[in-house]
Image (cartoon, grey):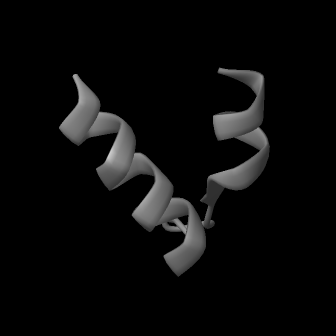
């Protein structure tokens, strides 16, 4: 979880910005689940 928190950056508007690389990794992890 700590890694995800460091990767995910919350903007002042409250929108969560995730880098493309992180998105790909998250998609792969979701697929494994």
Numbered disc total: 0
Residue 15 appears in the figure: no
Pinpoint residue 15: horizontal percent, then vertical percent. Answer: 43, 63
Q: Is residue 27 left or right of residue 33?
A: right
Q: Is residue 31 left or right of residue 15?
A: left
Seen in the picture, residue 25 relative to 23 is either above or below; the reply is: above
Which residue does the image show at 79% across and 44% down from the upper left? 6
User: Which residue is at the front of the view, 19 or 13?
Assistant: 19
Q: Residue furthest front?
A: 32
User: Which residue is at the front of the view, 11 or 6?
Assistant: 6
Seen in the picture, residue 24 relative to 5 is either above or below; the reply is: below
Which residue does the image show at 64% across and 38% down from the upper left? 4
**What quarter of the picture does the N terminus occupy?**
top right
Which residue does the image show at 44% across and 64% down from the upper left? 23
**What quarter of the picture does the C terminus occupy?**
top left
Which residue does the image show at 26% across and 30% down from the upper left? 32
Figure quadrant of residue 3: top right
Pinpoint residue 17: horizontal percent, then vertical percent. Answer: 52, 68
User: Which residue is at the front of the view, 16 or 14?
Assistant: 16
Q: Is residue 23 left or right of residue 8?
A: left
Q: Is residue 12 left or right of residue 33?
A: right
Pinpoint residue 25: horizontal percent, then vertical percent. Answer: 48, 54
Residue 22 appears in the figure: yes
Figure quadrant of residue 22: bottom right
């Amino acid at each position: 979880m700590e890694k995800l928190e460091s990767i995910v950056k919350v903007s002042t508007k409250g929108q969560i910005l995730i880098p493309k690389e992180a998105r790909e990794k998250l998609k792969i992890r979701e697929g494994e689940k």
